[in-house]
Amino acid sequence: MTSTNTLSRVTMAEVRSRIGEPEAMIEAKIGDRVDRYARRFIAHSPFLTLATADAAGRADCSPRGDYPGFVKVLDDRTLALPDRPGNKIADSFRNIAENDGVGLLFFVPGMRETLRVNGSAYITDDPDVLARMRTEAKAPILAIVVDVTEVYFHCGRALIRSRLWDPASQALAAELPSAGEIAADQMGADPELLEQLLEDGYRKLY
C-alpha cells in the first residue's frame, strides 16, 4: 500500500486541465443575495451543514437542524441561525470568533438539489433576532448571523448517486453499532448508561 506521505499532489492548474472549465451558464447562477427562490428553499429546509475554519485554517463541519424554516432570512443579504442545545463543545463559535468565513449547505427532504450559501459570520444575542427563532415557547440564547456573499443551487447528482432519499438506504443503519456502543468502546464506559444519557439529551431538544 502506498504511504500517504508519498501520494501525488495535483495543482489547481492540473485540475483544470483534466476536468475543464465550467459552462458560462453554471457560473452565471452564482448570486450575491437571497432571492425569492432561495428564500422559499430556506423556509422549507429543516437541516443544513455549517462549515467553519479556525485562524490556522483547520476546518470543521457541523450539522444543524430544527423545524423547516428554522434559519431566518433577515434581509436579502443576511441570515440568522439559532443555536439550540448541543454538546457545548462550541467548535463553530470558536472558529467564527477566529475566522469569520462560513459555508452553509441547505437540504430539503426528498429534494435532489441543495442550496449553497457562503459568507462571513458573527455571533449575536440580539433580543429581536432571538425572538424570531422562538420554538416550543423557548428562544435560543445565541444565534449566528451570516452576511451573505454567494448563493446558488447545487445540482442533484451527489444525492442521486448516494440514493440519500431512497427508503431502502435506511437499512444501512442497521449494520452499524449504536452511538452508545461506539462511545462506550471509545471511552471504556457502560454502554447502557451512555445510551440512557444520549436519550435524555435527545429529549431536551430545546
Image: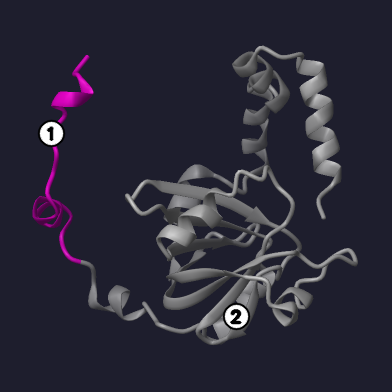
Residue found 55% across the figure and 56% down from its top: 93
Give coordinates of residue 143: x percent, y percent. 65, 67
Question: Compared with residue 201, is residue 7 higher up or lower down, i.e. above or below?
Answer: above
Disc 1: which residue: 8
Q: Quadrant of residue 198?
A: top right
**Residue type highlighted by circle 1:** Ser
Give me the C-alpha separation between circle 1 and circle 2: 42 Å
Residue found 76% across the figure and 63% down from its top: 67
Relative placement, left or right, of 144 versus 32 is right
Q: 36 or 67: nearer the eye?
A: 67
Residue 187 showing in the rendered view:
yes
Q: Please give the range of residues in magenta.
A: 1-21
Quadrant containing the C terminus in the rendered view: bottom right
Question: Compared with residue 197, is residue 13 higher up or lower down, i.e. above or below?
Answer: below
Disc 2: which residue: 39
Q: 159 or 42: nearer the eye?
A: 42
